[in-house]
Image: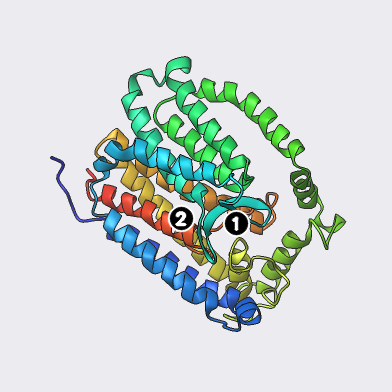
Amino acid sequence: MKSQRTPDYFLIFVIVAILLVGTIMVYSASSIWAEYKFNDSFYFLKRQILFAGVGVIAMMIVSNIPYFQWIKYRKRIFIGSLILLVAVLIPGIGMVRGGARSWIGVGAFSIQPAEFIKLAMIMFLSGFLVNHQDKITEFKKGFLPPLSISVIVFLIIMLQPDLGTGMVFLVTCFLLIFVAGAKIMHFVFLAGFGVIGFLLLIISAPYRINRITAFLDPWQDPLGTGFQIIQSLYAIGPGGLLGVGFGNSLQKYFYLPEPHNDFIFAIIAEELGFIGASFVIILFFLFIWRGILTAIHAPDLFARLLAVGIVGMIAIQVMINISVVIGLIPVTGITLPFLSYGGSSLTLTLCSVGILINISKYRQ
């Protein structure tokens, strides 16, 4: 029987701090659009508080479930999530938003199965790698099976299509396989095929090529493919050191698309300036630091892989989102964990960190 300690309260404090910042900024970023569309400037705030409330309750419940219990149910959770992911592709069941068939739901309330599959895959893959630890250095028996499962699920996600979520999913899987002890040369061998596959994904969809050309020169089509990144930079630039002040963003007045969602970091930089944006980044660094410590001091390999997978998933998503917002990589359409508006993403992220908190109780 594993002995429990107190949870990592510093980790919990950081999570709550990021969540509070996100809730406040969702209101500021969404109030104008909410007033225009729903005649209620608090519309998105009220829903975000509801999502956060459900997520926090779920986090508290999950944080009290011993992490080693998940290994028993990982296959069922994975299969259930996979069924939902496939169901999204069925006309009449899946809902199309923003050009992607990524949602299942009724009316205004819906879920995004791609968010569920990320956590389900972390559980499944962690258990698989623990059970096949003695073969992980072998290409055919240890490296290829988890890689194949990961790529198959990635391709299903790409059928929606959702490249941003797919990339977070796939890189997280690679990270888990690497931490489990796979040989670096196997990844080097894989890299060549990965580059070819990535190029094929880009060529297969003209809009992805447009995003890359817009990334290289957004001013080539300032009212089309380059519009989002130009408006994002217009938000960040005037922010300066201290920002224009909370609630005083100009870009949220129908200039910047998705100001309360994918591009909320741009509004943070505009209203709170370099200092405010840096504060948010520091909070994420603190979260990653405490998460890595939790993984290092985890009592067994399954706990270590779970912790690495959860922290890695969130860290990769943060890096991609912020890189998009400041123009370092092409637009991918991915949310900023804890901060962006949304139900599935926020709730599943909080469930994930609930598992991380539970693992911290068993740290050695």
Q: Based on the displayed image, in which of its 4 quarters is residue 60 positioned?
A: bottom left
Q: Is 40 placed above or below 24 here?
A: below
Say which quadrant the C terminus sits in: top left
Q: Position of residue 5 (x, y in %)?
A: 18, 52
Q: Is residue 13 visible?
A: no
Q: Is residue 76 visible?
A: yes
Say which quadrant the N terminus sits in: top left
| For discs 2 and 1, the disc positioned in front in the rendered view | 1
- Judging from the image, what secondary structure is the residue with disc 2 in? helix
Amino acid tagged 2: Phe
Q: Nearer the viewer, residue 28 or 343?
A: 343
Q: Position of residue 228 (x, y in %)?
A: 73, 61
Say left or right for 293 vs 20.
Answer: left
Q: Which residue is mark 2?
A: 285
Q: Which residue is mark 1?
A: 322
Disc 1 crowd rating (10 Å Cα; few below 14, some 14-19, many 20+) is: many
Report how far apart the C-alphas of labels 2 and 1 lie in the structure: 13 Å
